Amino acid sequence: MSIALQSLMVAVLCLCASFARAAESPAGGEVVADNPVELQPLQQLSATRDKPLFSAARRPPAKPVAPVARQEPPPPPPPPPSVVVLGIVSENGDGHAAIRAASKGDKVLRVRTGDDVSGWKVERIEPRRLVLKQGERSVDFALFTGAAKPPKPAERPIRQTKTAAPTN
């Protein structure tokens, strides 16, 4: 390449650079800064003076705490029905029970396995026991729930012995 061509290229580059600078500078004498903070007055930039960046007291803002939903405890399960077993009959392996449920009044009911008694299902009928089930809960009712009275001891006859009468 010739020296004349090289000097022409340098002149074009200088001319382009001056046009670029003229295009960047605003009209009317405004000052343009590369950093926008540079244009702020120093009195407005007091946060770093008031809370130095590397101070132990400077902490990030607390994270917002989401309100905890208060959970109500589940309602207590319903009590088992009040049932009195009056009798149990077993016919060919199939049992029936005669019961009196408080919810049905004083009416005597005859129930089988699978029947409903005040929302409870009859699960089993055994020779002296009725089992009702509701979900995972079950309750047993015995045929003779009264406390058995202890047998009375046999009375022994009082033994009388004859004593000899005194003789004179």
Image (cartoon, rainbow, N blue to C red):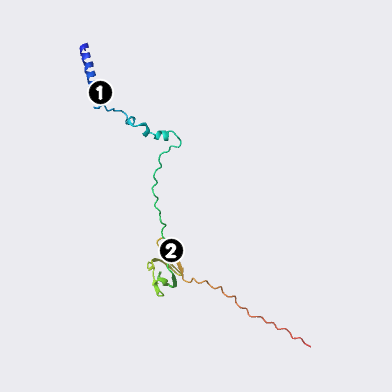
Residue 5 position (above or below residue 121)? above
Residue 167 position (above or below residue 37)? below
For the C terminus, the image quarter is bottom right
- What residue is pinned by disc 1? 21
- Could you tell me how far apart the alpha carbons at marks 1 and 2 are, in whole angstroms? 93 Å
| Amino acid type at image mark 1 | Arg
* Depth order, front residue of 36/133: 36
Q: Earlier in the sequence, mark 1 or mark 2?
A: 1
**Going 45% across and 66% down the picture, which residue do you hit?**
140
In terms of secondary structure, where does tag 2 sit? strand
The image quadrant of residue 61 is top left
The image quadrant of residue 160 is bottom right
Neighbor class of circle 1 (other Cα within 10 Å; few <14, some 14-19, many 20+) is: few
**Going 24% across and 18% down the picture, which residue do you hit?**
14
Q: Residue 151 shows which numbered tag?
A: none
* Depth order, front residue of 91/41: 41
- Which mark's residue is nearer the viewer, 1 or 2? 1
Neighbor class of circle 2 (other Cα within 10 Å; few <14, some 14-19, many 20+) is: some
Number of numbered discs on residues: 2
Counting from the top left corner in percent of width and height, residue 150 is at 56, 73
Can you name the residue that lies furthest to the top here?
3
| Amino acid type at image mark 2 | Ser
**Going 42% across and 35% down the picture, which residue do you hit?**
50
